[in-house]
Amino acid sequence: MDSQPAPRRRAYWLKTLHQWHWISSALCLLGMLLFAITGLTLNNASHIESKAVVTSRQAQLPEPVLKQLSAPAGQKKAPLPAPVAQWLDESLDAATAGKTAEWSADEVYLSLPRAGGDAWLSIDLASGDVEYERTDRGWISYLNDLHKGRNTGLAWSWFLDIFAVACLVFSLTGLVLLKMHAGNRSATWPMVGLGVVIPVVLALLFIH
């Protein structure tokens, strides 16, 4: 590559950088729109009205299932036995499989947070009575939790990491492209400097 004339090298790097830039922008498009919109909703949360919908349900474990509900020896936190979790998931749509429960002498309690809401479930060890409560805070809350990665699971966590890397590629290739075109655009570096100075000044003067 070094043996190539400077104009040809420049053309090669321009083509390569443009290719990486548009690929990363295509991968980031939906994520950037989501994060921009939820950035607005999070920043203006006090002005956006949302009403939580709370659903409460009661049930009772069948005797064969209740017999399999025994506290793990010496443990205060452990998942529910598989047959119990399966019955709860089928009967209440509670999504308890694999979740850690808190065991006491007379009760099992599960906290079931999720994106856009919350839930909890308790089981009386003596009677098998089940109480389940689910809170849904709406789509805006759901999208806000996606923005924060709150209670979204491993797959979404991986997506956020990959999305962050794609945004870095998009930003850095854009910066190099700015440098390569700066000779013909006198406003390039003043605009870049302004984009750096404005948030720094706001942070120093107005954030305490």
Image: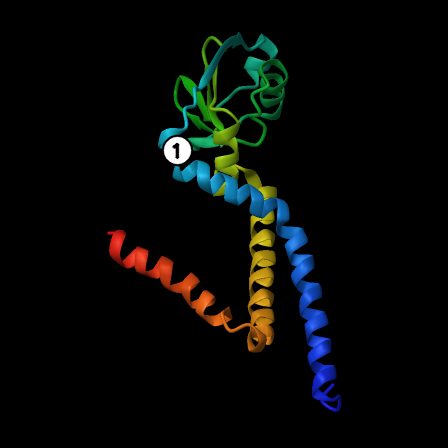
Residue 149, visible in the rendered structure: no
Residue 105: % across, % down: 39, 20
- Residue type, mark 1 in image: Ala
Residues 5 and 190: in front is 190
Element under label 1?
helix
Going 56% across and 52% down the picture, which residue do you hit? 161
**In which quadrant is the N terminus drawn?**
bottom right
Going 60% across and 53% down the picture, which residue do you hit? 162
* Up/down of 51 relative to 127, above or below: below
Going 73% across and 89% down the picture, which residue do you hit? 5
Residue 189: % across, % down: 47, 71
Residue 103: % across, % down: 43, 25
Q: Which colour assignment does the render follow? A: rainbow
* Up/down of 27 relative to 130, above or below: below
Please give the residue where the numbered disc 1 appears in the rendered image. Answer: 45
Residues 146 and 195: in front is 195
Mark 1 Cα shell of 10 Å, populated few (<14), some (14-19), many (≥20): some
Q: How many marks?
A: 1
Q: Residue furthest bottom?
A: 3
